[in-house]
Image (cartoon, grey):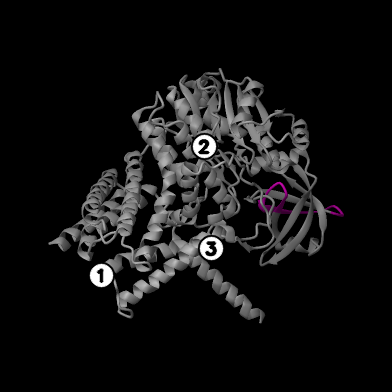
Amino acid sequence: MYIVIISLLVVVLFLSYVLGKKFHFFRQLLILLYVVLTSVYIIWRIGWTLPYNNWTSFLFGIFLLAAEIGGFVLSLVFYRIFLKKYQRSKLGLESFQGKYPSVDIFIATYNESTDILKRGIVAAKLSKYPITEHVNIYVCDDGNRPDVLSLCQELEVHYVSRTTHEHAKAGNLNHALTVSDGELIVTMDADMVMREDFLEKTIGYFSHSKMGFIQTPQTFFNQDPYQFNLFAGSKIGNDQDFFMRRIETQKDAFNAVMYVGSNAVFRRQALESINGFTTGVITEDMATGMFLQSQGWESGFVNENLASGLAPETFGDLVKQRDRWARGNIQVAKKWDPWRIKGLTLTQRILYVDGIHYWFSGIYKMIFLLAPLLFLIFGQYSLQTNLNQILIFWLPSFLSSQLAFNLVAEKKQTVTLSNIYEVATAPFMAFAVFNELFLKSKKGFAVTRKGVNNATSYYNFSTAWPILLLLGLSVVALIRGVAFVTGYWESPFPIEGIYINVFWLSYNVIGLIFAAYLSNERPRLRQSERFNSKEDVQILLPENQSINGHIVDWNEDGARIRVKENAMKLIQKNSNLEGKLIILGVEFEFISKWQIDNIGHHTMGVIFKDLSSEAYELVIAQTYAQSSENFKENKYKNRVWHIILLWWINTLKKRKTFQNNK
């Protein structure tokens, strides 16, 4: 009878998943089934599965149960905001009826290079707005650097510095508020580059008098460590995409959009109502948005790629960034409990508490990683049950959780990929939260490194050792488990209890293998990212020779250019050929560093020499700052098996190359 019921449940779950891709009713049905089935599972876990063998097993059982309940609570909030799709209606500048507000653009910087700063400043100057005199750009330099001052003078933008540097970035922005007077404030991190239509797509919402701030997603033009170190840049998206593009969109339905520190527009009056950007914590962005909403101001999210920047370029830098975010959220919870802040709605309180609670998932993941190890290596039980009960209570809950998440995520994320992200950062996030809660961490605000380049590959053992330790123990436990199941070794444990632990160990080992590989830092040779293009180019060579071609990809440093085969005779191969390029009527001087003959065409790599202001602006306008209407975002399927397949193909290629060179 139980088998029939479970089989029917499995069929209903898979049908709901398939039909939920087209029909909203089945999407909601699958979410409802997940909530009911997992509620039943949790009740069963509380009442009938705690181990009473000894006090240590009982304690570990409580920890595992608490982690499962914590994960279920997080999922309840998650599925609540995804129960109904939401998309904010567009509102353009025409809503002001010709009376456009003044706009101040704050670019906050501390130690970023002038090369990174320059493209952001130039892009801000290129931004379209009906009355350009209403837009002022302020470079807020908390590093008090002469070269940044010179850059601002060259580009004719305001340079802002201060003699004291209290409250880090928030203090920097608050100081800028005292020396500016724009009605609206745009906050940009130094590495973020706004697209030319950023203002056109965001300012219109402030025609509503209660709009306090508009957030746009943080997107990135380089590959993050997950994409880059796993050779998966074409297969998986940035690990922040799901939060930035899906979760923030759904939070907008409840006026609970989270300010993420950059790519946002504020009403000055709103900021003044809370005495400026919030200070006293290292995640001033989250706290600032929360206080604005508590004062009755509206927030909005515009889900368009309107500004892009640099993601952390090493896994070590990513870990430091997430450590700061985790500690900052705990600081906010300790200093300003969202449950006690006056003015927030019940839903807003729940969503902010949920945002803080999320950072405890590192602790939950560590418990899930350790539980099967404790059983198969050390004989410590975390739950007491049998295989029939597991099939009845756990299997439907597990299947529904996998299917519901993959359906709701809509390929922006998958359960397997999410597991890799969580496993890779779990030891560090767990320590950060524990440290901030109980050890009174004294770490302050730290800027994530940007523009990191390295010419060699290296393995970062400082980030790898916790993962390697867990992987080693998991493999040992898995070997023991398989040996017990096959009868190679006599099992001291009930055989039914081994099955579920072997399953979880296999699942964990897959995530740990990927996580261990992330610390293998690949070389990043280019100073700047390249952007694909099909722009026509005229190449002017010495002795009044001229050939035509088109750009394959380019940036402010150089370009890859393709010309037809019949033009090859004019190009002296493998020499430092010098000449000029004419692109959209603008002249570029270049040195050609390499040339490659291909069937039917010839490709050459050029480095630009001393770009004029006009040439530099053209490059920025055609690459980093190109209109969101023209920019084509990559679409990823985010499937882990694609990464595995790429590894296999690359391994075969390397083996073939090695054999050919022997």
Three-letter amino acid code at the position of disc 1: Pro
Q: On residue 241, which mark appears?
A: none
Helix, strand or loop at label 2? It is: loop
Q: What residue type is labelled 3?
A: Tyr
- Residue 457 image point, x, y percent: 64, 63
**Mark pair 1, 2: CA separation:** 50 Å
Q: Do the residues labelled 3 and 1 touch (CB within 8 Å)?
A: no
Between the C-alphas of marks 3 and 1, the distance is 35 Å
Residue drawn 70% across and 28% down? 162
The disc label shown at residue 517, or none: 3
Ranked by sequence position, the earlier of labels 3 and 2 is 2
Outermost residue toward the right?
A: 543
- Determine whether, in the image, residue 496 is placed left or right of residue 661: left
Q: Magenta span covers which residues?
A: 542-559
Identify which residue is drawn at 51% across, 70% down: 648
Q: Name the residue under label 2.
A: 260
